Amino acid sequence: MINVSGHEFWIQPDKFIYKRGETTNIKFLVGENFGGANWSGDRDKINSMSLYFDDVADKELTDDLGVNKGDSLQIAMLDEGTVMVTLNTKNSFIDLEAKKFNEYLREDGLTNAIDYREKNGDTIKNGLEYYQRSVKTIFQVGEKMTNVFKQKTELPLDIIPADNPYKVAKDGHFKVKVFFLGEKLKKTRIKVWHKVDDKVTKQEYTTDDDGEIKFFLSPEGEWMVSCVKMVRLENDPKAEWQSYWGSLTWGYY
């Protein structure tokens, strides 16, 4: 994977299944192959962080974060239910050498950017890019399960499962739908990661005309669905591209 902006970024609790009242420690992770180190950002890099739970539609969590780089977030859920936490970071800027930028576009299937650069003779130019992250995690507290998982959020890039992942009792097909700025994200490469006992597998899919993919799910280990959307910028004095990195995590321990 290409270094810098090409790394996956996700949020993940220290475990995914909790008893009522247990403290949840949510980490911000960046890395390759679903193996992450603490993000080096801080509260100033965060646009919003929100909690979705039962009748609490959108509780802002940003003020609960510390000010140190790589801080995690601790919350304790006093009631049972399915919980969703979302994070949207502010834009960061990167100036990536042309060869690395071209490789990164190919690796993530960003054909619109590849085609534009080839058509306009830009493949020898550096990639001048803003990037931000739109990530979420879903975990379960106690036995009560709710439909909070399918609520649309304010994330620019929003990955929404069709069913509650904690109601899955056995191996079977599972669907997620991807939205960009509220619209179905069609014909986009999606990566599905599965980690069991530190062994990671990855499958790649392409969304259909409904912005949806279907994949085989087994209720064990950790799961992540991730994708990237790249947009061409016009008349920006600094960058030519804006990327949005999205991910969704859940798990069964």
Image: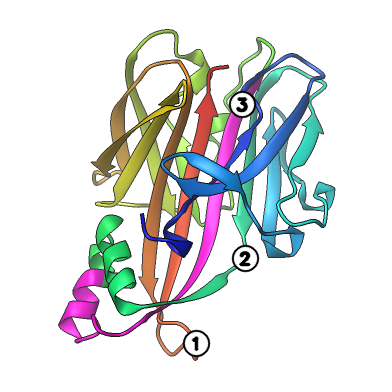
Nearer to the camera, 102 or 62? 102
State which region is magenta.
114-140
**Position of residue 214 in the picture relative to residue 239 (left or right):** left
Q: Whole-percent x and y of residue 176?
A: 39, 35
Q: Whole-percent x and y of residue 198?
A: 46, 26
**How far is disc 2 from disc 3 in space, using C-alphas?**
25 Å
Q: Earlier in the sequence, mark 2 or mark 3?
A: 2
Residue 216 sits in quarter: top left
Kind of element beneath mark 2: loop
Q: Amino acid at mark 3?
A: Phe
Q: At 45% across and 29% down in the image, what residue appears?
A: 223
Kindly identify which residue carries mark 3.
139
Residue 229 sits in quarter: bottom left
Q: At 74% across and 29% down in the image, what residue appears?
A: 24
Kindly identify which residue carries mark 2.
90
Q: Earlier in the sequence, mark 1 or mark 3?
A: 3
